[in-house]
Amino acid sequence: MHSNEQVRGWLFGIGAFVFWGLAPIYFKALTSVSADEILAHRILWCTPFTLLFIWALKKPLNFTAIIKQKKLFLGLVLTTSLVSVNWYIFTWAVTHDHILDTSLGYFINPIFSILLGVIFLHERLTVLQWGAVVFATLGVTNQIVNHGEFPWISLSLATTFAIYGFIRKQLHVDSLNGLLVETTIAMPFALAYIIWLFVSQQNAFTTQSLSIDILLLSGGIITAVPLIWFASSAKIIPLNSVGFLQFIAPSMSFVLATAYYNEPLGKDQLISFIFIWCGLALYMVKPIKTMISKGNARRKQPA
């Protein structure tokens, strides 16, 4: 593959995860709006923006063909439910000062993906990968025993996103058309809820400020852009490389939470993060070796 194409793939990937890493700033600006109204607007405006991106990128529109395939459509109904729950929990967590919990959740997510492969695809784990699972388990257990609470935000985010990614990989649909169908499935519910808010005069949209209105309208862009960049990156660079990049977002969220939003990081919670980071270090050994061996193989090929 041409080096410029590789660079483009890395830039898309880095851009997507940096975008996701900065997402808490967007949701923090909407703390005066309820999480359910934010989610409704995010779903509602994502549909037209996704259509616009499909047109602008000159991609084929396969909406009708997708919904005619019963098994595929039902699969997307399931992924719609999972991603909607994931979006809601993330939005609620950020707007209620739990960014650290979201960071921990997305650090745990890759290890949950490993377990899904073992359970449903009968994949075999290396000793180091089992070590990663053990460290992740220790991190979660420490959070429960010493921090004094069940980390439901972290585990819910990790579980819903891992299952979402697992199912989407089994569905033969491109990311843009898949996202369009998912948001279209959820859109009637989102629209109905927004109408109900207006009727019951509980709406933040159009009643607070112009900046809040603009932010809510921007929810579609906030959702669609990083997904498109991520999909473009995944088509160009190896999945192992994407695996490296996925830790950008929770790392940035961790820094934002502790350094900018001053969320308290107690000793027990820090220990949980250290366990998870140790697990991730073990998890990344195999991808690193694979990347190095592929790089050496390419260098040995005759020009």
Image: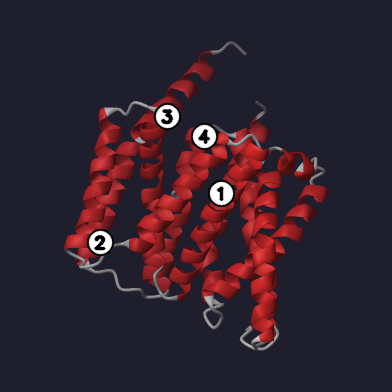
Disc 4 to disc 2, C-alpha distance: 29 Å
Crowding at mark 3 (Cα within 10 Å: few <14, some 14-19, many 20+)? few
Quadrant of the snapshot with the N terminus: top right
Q: Is residue 232 in view from this perspective?
A: no
Q: Earlier in the sequence, mark 4 or mark 3?
A: 3
Foreground disc of the pair 1, 2 = 1
For badge 1, the amino acid type reads: Thr
* Residue 295, percent from left and from top: 49, 24
* Residue 232, percent from left and from top: 65, 41
Foreground disc of the pair 3, 2 = 3
Q: Secondary structure at mark 4?
A: helix
Determine contact: label 4, label 2, CB under 8 Å.
no
Q: Earlier in the sequence, mark 4 or mark 2?
A: 4
For badge 2, the amino acid type reads: Leu
Judging by the rendered image, the residue that carries numbered circle 1 is 79
Judging by the rendered image, the residue that carries numbered circle 4 is 239
Judging by the rendered image, the residue that carries numbered circle 2 is 270
Judging by the rendered image, the residue that carries numbered circle 3 is 121
* Residue 171, percent from left and from top: 60, 36
Q: Nearer the viewer, residue 127 or 21?
A: 127
Residue at image x 17%, y 61%? 145
Residue most extreme to the left: 146
Q: Earlier in the sequence, mark 1 or mark 2?
A: 1
Residue 228 in the image: above or below residue 295: below
Quadrant of the snapshot with the C terminus: top right
